[in-house]
Amino acid sequence: MSKLIDGKAFADRLCATLAEEVVTLKKDNQLSPCIAVVLVGEDPASATYVGAKVKRCEQLGIDSRSHHLDVTTSEEELLSLIEQLNNDPEVHGILVQLPVPKQINGDAVINAINPDKDVDGFHISNAGALAVGQNNMVPCTPLGSLMLLQDELGDLSGMNAVVVGRSNIVGKPMAALLLQQSCTVTIAHSRTKDLPAVCREADILVAAVGIPHFIQADWVKPGATVIDVGINRIKDEATGKNRLVGDVDYSAAAEVAGAITPVPGGVGPMTIACLMYNTVAAAKNQAGIA
Ligand code: GUN
């Protein structure tokens, strides 16, 4: 049985440190970090994620301003809100929960955010900055995953890392971060030939495909460190109730891996903690505090 990587505990420690920093920023610098969270429509999963983000802000003393817009909101209306938030000196971070309704071009909205306020790290200039090693705002899920890996393994230099999934939100930035740590990085995806064999080469295996229990135990190299980014809602056959599972067949893979993140309680809490981290960093950056 492998070691469980406790993302919830790590996230709680990181948030406790950030809460102390927020107290100091308010007292010594009269700086009150603030994030604007924009939700368009009524998608229940998005509403849950946004609720969890706002709750963490409250725990840390970070101000949050919620903008819940109707599902019929036009792109023009959303862009006008983004412009208003870009120009508001009291707002340091702007997050638009994705996906947005189909009448809105999500890329256009993200790229309208001031890159220094883009606490999700999704703006095209932040993606480019990461690709060339001039990191500004780094996407939260890959950043949190990297923190867990470094805590578990220390120096990652020379390790074989396989990232399964090539999304702009997770796969590509995760690969860029691992490359910055001098890993030998493979990005695998739906067209990869003999995916099980590719995965078996990994010292570090990151699963970000969005398919429940996709990664099998016999795809995992014995002793490998497995980071499961998936958050999939499935109906439990036995109880008939919904439950969250990852992209990895956890119980079987845990017999083979050296260390593995659970779902829930692994990467998920780190994503929100890193959003808090980016918000504090954005506030300091905008106030000229090192
Ligand atoms: N939708 C799914 N994941 C995310 C995320 O990390 N940030 C935002 N804004 N939307 C998402």
Image (cartoon, grey):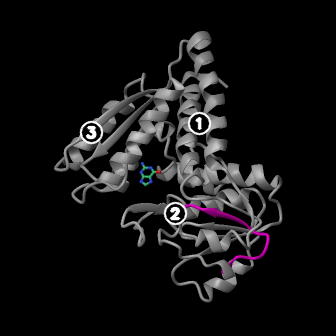
Amino acid type of disc 1? Tyr
Residue 129, image x, y percentages:
59, 50
Q: Which residue is mark 1?
A: 277
Q: Secondary structure at mark 1?
A: helix
Residue at the image point whose x is 51% and y is 23% from the top: 61
Q: Which residue is mark 2?
A: 230
Residue receiving disc 3: 68
The answer for how far apart the CA atoms under marks 2 and 3 are is: 26 Å
- The residue nearer to you, when weighing 142 against 84, is 142
Report the side of 9 relative to 223 (left or right).
left
Disc nearest the viewer among 2 and 3: 2
From the top left corner, tell me how far across and down residue 44 is, in percent. 30, 52
Side of 257 relative to 130 (left or right): right
Question: Which image quadrant: the C terminus?
Answer: top right
Which stretch is magenta? Answer: 219-230
Disc 3 to disc 1, C-alpha distance: 23 Å
**Which callout, 2 or 3, points at the residue further toward the start of the chain?**
3
Measured in 3D between alpha carbons, the distance from the residue under mark 2 to the one under mark 1, in whole angstroms, is 22 Å
Residue at the spot 82% in from the left edge and 52% down from the top edge: 154
Q: Is residue 193 visible?
A: yes
